[in-house]
Image: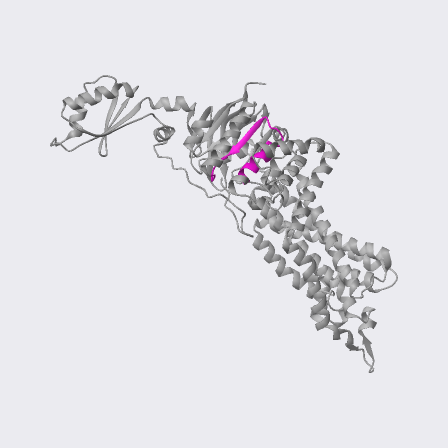
Amino acid sequence: MGDKIIEVRDLVKVYDPDVRAVDKISFDVNRGEIFGFLGPNGAGKTTTIKVLTTLIRKTSGTAIVDGMNADHEPAKIRQIIGYAAQEVGIDDDLTGRENLRLQCALYHVHKSEAETRIAELLKTIDLEDAADRRAGTYSGGMRKRLDLAMALVPRPKLLFLDEPTTGLDPQNRSAVWEYIRKLNKQGMTIFLTTQYMEEADRLADRLSIIDHGKIMAEGTPASLKASIGADVVTLSFKENGNPNPKAAAKDALGRLGRIREIQEVDGGIAIYAQDAPALVPQIVLALNDAHLEIAELTLTHPTLDDVFMKYTGRKMRAEEVTPKGRTPWGARRRRAM
Amino acid sequence: MTAGEFVSEVNAIASRWIKKTLRRPPFLFFSLVQPIVWFVLFTQAFSSISNIRTPIGGGRFLTFADITGTSSYLTFFSAAVIIQTVLASAMQSGVGFVTDMESGFLDKLKVAPIRRSSILLGKLMSDGARILLQTFVILVLAFILGVGIATGVLGLVLLFGIALAFGIAWSGISTFIALATKNSESTLMISLLTTFPLLFLSTAVMPKPLLPDWVQSVAGYNPISYIADGLHGLIITPGLDWSVVGLAFLIIAAVGFVTLSATTTMFRRAVSA
């Protein structure tokens, strides 16, 4: 077996009538890593996960999971994966413990072992106190944690997490991050999707940026940020009689080496340069010599937001989803693609 | 995958549904309150039905007892209560699949390393168990009100058998509708729209000779009539008439074959891709 646990080549999924949810993507996931899919709603994240978890069939291309082809050996793939969907799939009429017991039965965990495993999982996700209450009474965060525990019942080699923290408050979010890191340390490979830059940055060893069904960029968070190539210094000026401070500043700074680009932006200028912190004193001196007074100076390292903007030309906005409680009787939920 | 694993999967899925059912208030309502209401209201309001005398010419009459074999409308009507309860119960079976699709629980079952057929079989088995329980409750009620089973223990067993088979066959209809529409309102609406006409255009609530001509001809094509005749035979007529009971089972088998094949096809489509 190779060191790739997932190999995807030219994967295409077209939904009826003509929605190309995933448009010819290729990527690999290495054994033992946390791999992230970062993109907005509707980018094709869930569709990709559903193909890999054998829930839907792809239109074309290949998807190999742990050496097994998703088209030909879906039943074998199901034996080594765990999956927590974006929409929490727990039974509200059963207690947390009963949900886990059912999951144990579905994964053929032997009865003698099931109770210990359930106790362990309940402890991991801090649900011991609520374990014998019906899941319908749980808060959004508790539901998401129980759902994560459900996915862990089979002790999967490969864990799929579709937006594991969407709709969670910051505390629950960092708790989930903590679990994910812990699981990964124990050797579990994790494939996660997210629409939060911070989450991708903090968790993923490597990630792909996906938009409109296409992978726009791929790499470690650090290498992606480095691909922006520069820190950003933004400046604005005080009124001091100079009719065109921006042009004067560009002129003054143009003589400094090591600046890659100066851009006029609303209210001031943006300076792109590597190792900008070391350059700031020279910038300040040069502007002083040119009789320009600085009103505001900010220095930022590139973020994944900048990366997303660079590769897609758009600002990414994570849509906050309210935590989902119990669906009202008969109400229909929209399924994400 | 071993046979033992298959049994435990089906069992786990069936137990889940049974637990869910018992924990939901509508179940208690439909299984207990509604049969009581039916028994009390209908048999009180229609008790004089048993006094109806049907002229047969020459100034002679047939009494209700001559036609049905019992002078108590309550006894006659208990078959209708069983049918109504089983119909209502079976017609809701499909809703469970819709909620599982909406909540994402079906996806959870689909990624588990189980046979896909366990999902459907476990559900149908839980439907069967629920229907047996509901039939039991009705029979206890009927017994308290003084209704006896004329055909004894064997008749009682056959009665449960009819209720069970009938319930599963009809669960197939609602499951089919649920899988086809993926919508619980439509499933419940179609169920409500079909239950009452099926019941009242049959021999369940009124013996055939007392029905208007057009209803009589419709009732002849209504499978519920044959099930009602079977139940009436078991409850009212001493001495087992196998032809009536056998016909009831035959009709159920035919209906069940159609509904369950359609459901299986629909289910396969729902779980694959």
Horizontal placement of A305 versus B18: left or right? Answer: left
Work out whether residue B64 or residue B61 is closer to the camera in this orientation and state it: B64
Q: Looking at the image, how many numbered discs can be counted on the residues?
A: 0
Q: Is residue A203 above or below residue A278?
A: below
Work out whether residue B191 or residue B266 is closer to the camera in this orientation and state it: B191
Q: Give the image location of residue B40, x and y in percent.
A: 71, 68
Q: Give the image location of residue B45, x and y in percent.
A: 70, 73
Q: Is residue A3 above or below residue A126?
A: above
Horizontal placement of B258 versus B59: left or right? Answer: left
Q: Give the image location of residue B69, x and y in percent.
A: 83, 69
The residue under the point 12% across, 30% down is A242
| Displayed quadrant of residue A4 | top right
Residue A199 in sight in this render: yes
Work out whether residue B201 or residue A29 is closer to the camera in this orientation and state it: A29
Find out whether residue A167 is within the magenta segment.
Answer: yes
In the displayed orientation, state which residue is furthest to the front.
A129
In the displayed orientation, state which residue is furthest to the bottom.
B59
| Displayed quadrant of residue A50 | top right
User: Where is the N terminus of chain A found, in terms of image quarters?
Assistant: top right
In the displayed orientation, state which residue is furthest to the left.
A241
Residue A208 in sight in this render: no
Q: Which residues are the magenta region?
A: A143-168
The residue under the point 56% across, 18% down is A2
Q: Give the image location of residue A161, x and y in percent.
A: 52, 33
